[in-house]
Image: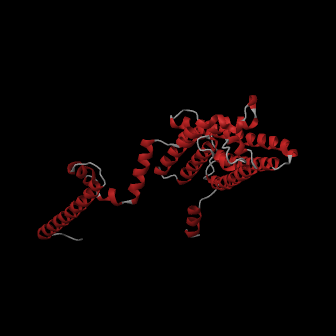
Amino acid sequence: MITTTATEKDHQGESSKSIDDGYTAAKQQECEELLKQFQSTGIKMSREDFEKIYLSQRPSQRDSPTQDLSALYDYRKRLGTPTPLSLMGFLICLSPLSCDLMGWRGAGGNGAAGMGSYFFFGGLLMILGGLLEFIMGKTFSFVVFCSFGGFWLTTASTLQPFYNVGAAYAINPNNTSLEQGFATVGFTASSGFFYVFMAVLCSIYFICSLRTNICNVFIFLNLTIAFCLLAAVNWTYAEVFAGDQSRIPLIHKLQVSAGAFLFITCIMGWYSFFAIMLISIDFPYQFPIGELSGLVRSRTQRMREMASPA
C-alpha cells in the first residue's frame, strides 16, 4: 500500500496549482491570438463574449476529433437536410421537359417554355442545395447537385435569346437569328458531344450510387440512357441538316425514347422526394428507398476485416 504524507500533499497541491496556472496562461495567450484573427477578418465580437465562448469549453472539447464529429452531427440536427431542396428543383425542371420531349398534348420546342424554371429551380436551387450539402460534409450530394445545377443553367443560357448562341452558327453572317443558327450541322453536332459527356458523368454517378440506395441507382441509370439518346437526337439532326431527309422519322423515335427514360427518372425522383419529406416531419409512415450501404461493403470495412486477427 502506498501512503502520502501531509508534506507530499502540499507539494502536490503546489505542483497542480502551477500546472493550472501554466495552462491558464497558455490558453489566455491562445485566446488573444484567436481574438486577433477574428478581429482581422472583420467579425465584430467583444473580448468578453469571445472568452465566454472559447474558454468555457474544456480542453477535451476543443482538441478531440471525436468531439468535432459530435458537434457536426449536432449541427446537422439543428440545420436540417438540404437534399429535398435540390431534388425539388431538379424535378420541377425535368418533369415538364420529359413531357415536352414525348410531345404530350402537343408540347414541343425542346423545352424552351421552361427556360425560367431552368434558371431558378434547376440552377439556383440545385447549386444552393449543393453548397449546403458541402457544409454538411456530403461530398457526393454536393458534386451531383452542383453539376446538375450547372447543366440547367447551361441549357437555359443556350435557349436564352439574350446570349444569342445560334449566331455563331448562322449561315448568313448578317443574320443573327437564333433559330437559323440552331438548324445547322455545326450546332447540332456540337450539342451532341455535350450530352455524351453528361452521359459519362451520370455513368460515374451510377457506379457511386451503388452504395447509396435503389432509387439513386435507377435515377442515374435512366439519366445515362436518356443523355445517350439526346446525343443521338442531335447527331441525327446534323445528318438531316446535311441533306439526309430519310433520318427525320428516327429523330422523333429517339426524342420520345429520351423523354420516356427521363420520365422514369422523374417517377423515382418524386418517390425519393416524398420519402425524404415524410422523414423530415417524422411522419408515422415512411416509404422504403432501398438502402444499399449495408449490401455493398465500404473500403473501410474491408480494411478492418483484413486487419482484424482471424
- Farthest front residue in view: 174
User: Would you place residue 286 above or below residue 193 in this image?
Assistant: above
Q: Is residue 22 left or right of residue 250?
A: left
Q: Which residue is drawn at 43% across and 42% down?
A: 79
Q: Which of 182 and 102 is in front in this view?
A: 182
Quadrant location of the N terminus in the rendered image = bottom left
Taking the image as drawn, is residue 287 in sight?
no
Which residue is found at the position 41% from the left and 57% from the top?
66
Is 117 placed left or right of 24 in the picture?
A: right
Give me the residue at 70% from left, 54% from top.
Answer: 193
Q: Is residue 149 left or right of residue 34?
A: right
Residue 140 location (% of width, % of height): 56, 53
Q: Where is residue 297 in the image (x, y as percent from the top left)?
A: 62, 58
Give the image quarter of residue 197: bottom right
Nearer to the camera, 82 or 276? 82
Across and down, in percent, residue 247 comes to 85, 46
